[in-house]
Amino acid sequence: MIDHDAIFKQLLTAFFVEFLDLFAPEVLALLDRASLTFLDKESFGDLVDPERREADLVVQAQLAGQTAYLIVHLEHQAQEDAAIHRRMFRYFARLYDRYDVPIYPIVLCSYLTPRTPVADRHQVAVGSFAVVDFRYQTVQLNRLDWRSYARNPNPLASALMARMRVASKERVQVKLACLRLLAGQPLDHRRRRLLGQFIDIYLPLNARQARDLEQELQAVQPEERRPIMEMLSSWEIKGRAEGRAEGQRDIVIRQLQRKLGLLPEALLARVEALPSEQFADLGEALLDFAATDDLVAWLDTHLLEKPHDPTA
C-alpha cells in the first residue's frame, strides 16, 4: 500500500517555497525565505489531535524586514475527512497558544474523489452570536484543471498536475505535459528525480498508453524532445535494462518507488550505495516486499561485506 502522506510530506518539504509560490504567493511575499524553519514533531507533538499522531508540516518563518514571526501549518489529506474543519481549528488554537504568533493554515487535498468542495471554515455560534468564525485556505487538487498549470514555470506544478482533474483519455497528454514542464526546469538531479518519481507513481500508464506517449514524444520538436529523453534515461531508462550498471540501478529504484512509495532520503541513500552487482538480487527480492521494513531487513542481511568488528 502506498503511503500517500509520507510521499506528499517528502515532496512538500523539498518544495515548500514552490508550494507557497503556487498557491499562496501573498503569504510567501511576506516571508524572509532564508528564515524558513521546519519544526519537528517533538516541538509540537503534545499539541496535535489524538486522532492523528502529528501535523503534516509546521514551518516557522520571519517576516521580511521585521523581527516578528509567522507560522504556516500545511496539512495534507489523502482521503476525505468530514471533521477536517474541527481538526484544523484545534491545530490552530494549540499552535497559537504555544507560539503566540500568527498562524496561516492550509489544507491540501490530494484524493481523487469526491470532488465536492472541502470545508474551508469552522464556525461556532450561540443563537445569532458568532463565537468562532475560523477560516483556512484549501487546495483541492481534484477540482483544479491541469491545463491551467501546464505552462507554469513553477517546478512543483509539473508533479501536482498528475493529481489534478484528469480524464482517462487525457492521461497520455497530461504525462507529456508534466514531462515537458519538468525537463525545462533548472533543478539538480535529486530534486528532478523526486518530481519525476512522483509523476510516475501518480500517473502510471498502461502498455498502450506508454506506446502512445512514445509516439507523442516523436512529434515534439527535437530541441525540446532531447532534454525530455535525457531526463527519462536518468530516472526511468524507458523501462529497459541495457546491461549498464547505472541503468539497472535506476530501474530497481524505480520499481521500489512504485511498490513502496517514495523512499525516505536515508533509506534511498543506502539503496544507491549498494554495489552494482547486488541490484539484480534486489530486483528479484523486491517482488516480495510489502513495506519499507522489508527493504530495510533485506539491506541489513544481504550486504556483500559485513562491517568489520574490531573486537573480533
Image (cartoon, helix red, strand yellow):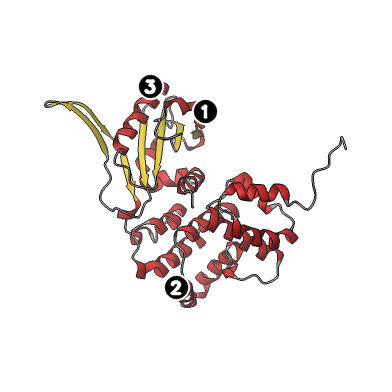
Residue under pointer 1: 42
Residue 227 x %, y %: 55, 67
Residue 88 x %, y %: 34, 34
Quarter where residue 212 is shown: bottom left
Q: Is residue 248 above or below residue 208?
A: above
Residue furthest left in the image: 128
Query: For numbered disc 3, what is the local secondary structure?
Result: helix
Q: Nearer the viewer, residue 178 or 256?
A: 256
Quarter where residue 266 is shown: top right
Give the Cα distance between marks 2 and 1. 45 Å
Residue under pointer 2: 209
For residue 102, side relative to residue 309 (left or right): left
| Dot 1 amino acid type | Glu
Of the two numbered discs 2 and 3 on the same chain, state the one appearing first in sequence: 3
Give the Cα distance between marks 2 and 3. 52 Å
Asked whether the viewer can see residue 94, the reply is: yes
Residue under pointer 3: 97
Residue contact at pointers 2 and 1, CB within 8 angstroms: no
Image quadrant holding the C terminus, namely top right
